[in-house]
Amino acid sequence: MNRAHNPTSMHMTRPLEWMLSCMLLVWGASMLRPEAFFDLPVYKIMGEVMTESRWGMVAASVAVLRMVGLGINGWWRRTPVIRFIGALSGGLCWLAIGFLMLVGSYAFNTRLPAGFGWYPLCFVFEGWCVLATGYDMFKNGSLTAGAAPRNVT
């Protein structure tokens, strides 16, 4: 029996990937509102890297592209490489946001906001998604050009 397209325990990260994409989209959309988040001291370092609206555009763009990739991977064709790139991009976004907020907190001797703990947590879960999609790429033979898909049970 061919089990090439059956979900594995690693493959069951898709709801987590959708959730993390939605969270990044909401974060990006909130940065696009006319409110000035970057007036807070913890965001000053982020403001020196890019403007608030650019952070919002980057986050929203990564989230939307990832959602498109998840849709292609889930409804049209099995392409775990798209999921891998999306998880890696999302993880880098969460890492940049969390790291720059942490640096801003130390640089200006201010407290981190109450929700700061979500950024490292999202980064860790994105790492899990990267590992899961890497396993799916290996299982499907996506890493070897022209190779037949593996049938791993």
Image: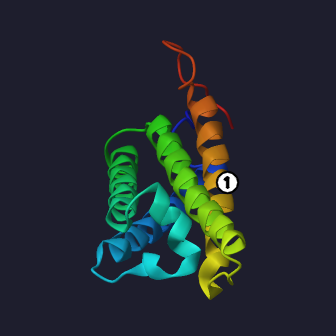
Which residue is nearer to you in this view: 22 or 141?
22
Say if 104 sits above or below 71 in the image. below
Give amino acid for label 1: Trp
Q: Residue at x 63, y 30 (%)?
A: 138
Which residue is nearer to you in this view: 116 or 72?
116
Q: Residue at x 68, y 82 (%)?
A: 110
Relative side of 77 to 21, left or right:
left
Which residue is nearer to you in this view: 71 or 119?
119
What percent of the width, then of the height, locates residue 70?
40, 51
Q: Residue furthest left?
A: 34
What percent of the width, then of the height, locates residue 123?
63, 60
Q: Residue furthest front?
A: 108
Say if 75 sits above or below 51 in the image. above
Way the structure is coloured = rainbow
- Mark 1 — residue? 128
Asked if residue 121 shows in the view, the reply is no
Asked if residue 19 shows in the view, the reply is yes
Question: Which image quadrant is residue 118 in?
Answer: bottom right
Q: Residue at x 45, y 75 (%)?
A: 38
The quadrant of the image that shows the C terminus is top right
What percent of the width, then of the height, locates residue 95?
61, 57
Q: In what element is the residue under mark 1?
A: helix
